[in-house]
Image: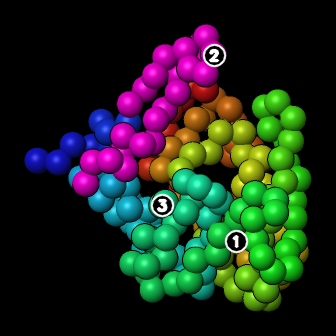
Amino acid sequence: MMKKLEEYVVSIPDFPEPGIIFRDVTSILQDADGLKLAIDGLMESLKDVEYDVVVGPESRGFIFGVPVAYKAHKGFVPIRKKGKLPRETLSAEYDLEYGSAVIEIHKDAIKPGQKVVIIDDLIATGGTIEAIIGMIEQLGGEVVKICFVMELAGLKGREKLKGYDIDSIIVYEGK
């Protein structure tokens, strides 16, 4: 019998600093059953959702978003760090724990009226996804669902994303 997805996550105490429990997603990826459970779980959360395209931020949004797009026969739009996309882009700046970062999307990647699903490995504070939503909406897309493999509920990322349909396969109560 297959284990539950949570059993594939390795938790590392006091990383990157004391008091933090780091939830390592690579332990899901390196096990065929863990990876299957993660992708199947994401597909399950999208079973009743009508959408045109999957969007995912680098790098782990690529890892989980591409197989979902493939299985659903949808296109995949990458969100990259500044300077990585070759054509004309739209950018968004967002806050990190220490400082800020800039992400970009190709200006022609989302067509007006397209229904968009965002997939990433983890929701913590929600800042990255909030920036992604802003870019998608600026391009005329409609975010119909946001799916995560893991959620750190103690960081209250959902509060930043109020009004959006959010699903997480695993929810950890802490930070």
Q: Is residue 78 above or below residue 12?
A: below
User: What is the image's colouring?
Assistant: rainbow
Amino acid type at circle 1 is Val
Left or right, 29 with reference to 174: left
x then y, percent, for residue 13: 49, 17
Residue range of the region highlighted in magenta in the rendering:
10-32
Q: Dot 1: what SS?
A: strand
Name the residue rendered at 72%, 46% in the picture: 126
What is the quadrant of residue 67 in the picture? bottom left
Labels 2, 1: front one: 2
The secondary element bearing badge 2 is classed as loop
Q: Mark 3 points at which residue?
A: 64
Q: How crowded is mark 3: few (under 14 residues within 10 Å), some or many (20 or more)?
A: many
Q: What residue type is labelled 3?
A: Phe
The residue at which mark 2 appears reads as 17
Quadrant housing residue 103: bottom right
Looking at the image, tell me whether mark 2 or mark 1 is earlier in sequence order.
2
* Real-space CA distance between mark 3 and mark 1, rounded to the nearest whole angstrom: 18 Å
Instruction: Mark yes or no: residue 37 visible.
Output: no
Depth check: give the residue in front, 8 or 16.
Answer: 16
Q: Is residue 82 left or right of residue 175?
A: right
| Residue position marked by numbered label 1 in the rendering | 143
Of the numbered discs 2 and 3, the one sitting upstream in the chain is 2
Mark 2 Cα shell of 10 Å, populated few (<14), some (14-19), many (≥20): few
Distance (Cα) linking label 2 and label 3: 27 Å
Percent position (x, y) of residue 174? 57, 25
| Label 1 neighbour load within 10 Å: few <14, some 14-19, many 20+ | many
Q: Which residue is drawn at 11% across and 47% down?
A: 1
Q: Residue at x 48, y 32 (%)?
A: 23
Instruction: Please tell me in which quadrant of the rendered image residue 99 appears.
Output: top right
Amino acid at dot 2: Glu
| Secondary structure at numbered mark 3 | helix
